[in-house]
Amino acid sequence: MALVQSDENDFHALREAQRMVDSCQDFADHLIVAEFLPHCRGVAYINIRTLEQVIYCVQLSRAGYRIVSYEFDDVADEVANCDTVYESAHQLLAGISPLYGEKYGFGREPLGKRKEKQS
């Protein structure tokens, strides 16, 4: 789920956020478009509770996904200044959820297949 757009006018943050939520629902304990933060064409917010039960509010913009708080529907100044931007939803989830990487094998062979080969 990379943010690849052919034209600057094609990007619509809220639509992309909903698409990410719909396609990645199984990869987190809770995943929803933020309800109480303002969205615009260029910026939307997503609430995530990882498989480890860690809470994040993530900003989605043309640049990618960026953590802005450790609470739902919140932008914390000290967190919002974070420079880490993830280009795709799967990079974000792999970066914040070790269980996601183990369970779904992002960037490597899925754990189940590795165990089968070892047997």
Image (cartoon, rainbow, N blue to C red):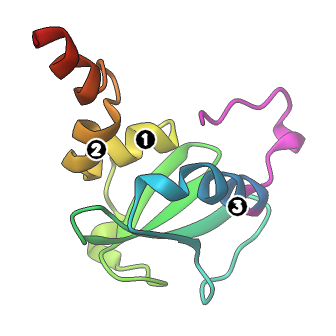
Mark 1 residue element? loop
Mark 2 residue type: Gly
- Residue at image position (27%, 38%) is 101
Check disc 2 and report the residue beneath it. 95
Give the foreground label among 1 and 3.
Answer: 3
Q: Which of 116 and 56 is in front in this view?
A: 116
Residue 109 pos. (x, y %)? 30, 18
Check disc 1 and report the residue beneath it. 86
Task: Determine whether, in the image, residue 18 is placed left or right of residue 2.
Answer: right
**Quick check: is 84 in the magenta stretch?**
no
Distance in Å between CA atoms under marks 2 and 1: 8 Å
Distance in Å between CA atoms under marks 1 and 3: 17 Å
Q: Mark 1 or mark 3: name the one nearer the start of the chain.
A: 3
Mark 1 residue type: Tyr
Q: Quadrant of residue 37?
A: bottom right
Q: Which span is picked out in magenta?
A: 1-14
In the displayed structure, 30 sits above or below 74; it is above
Q: Main secondary structure of the magenta part?
A: loop
Question: Quarter holding the N terminus?
Answer: top right
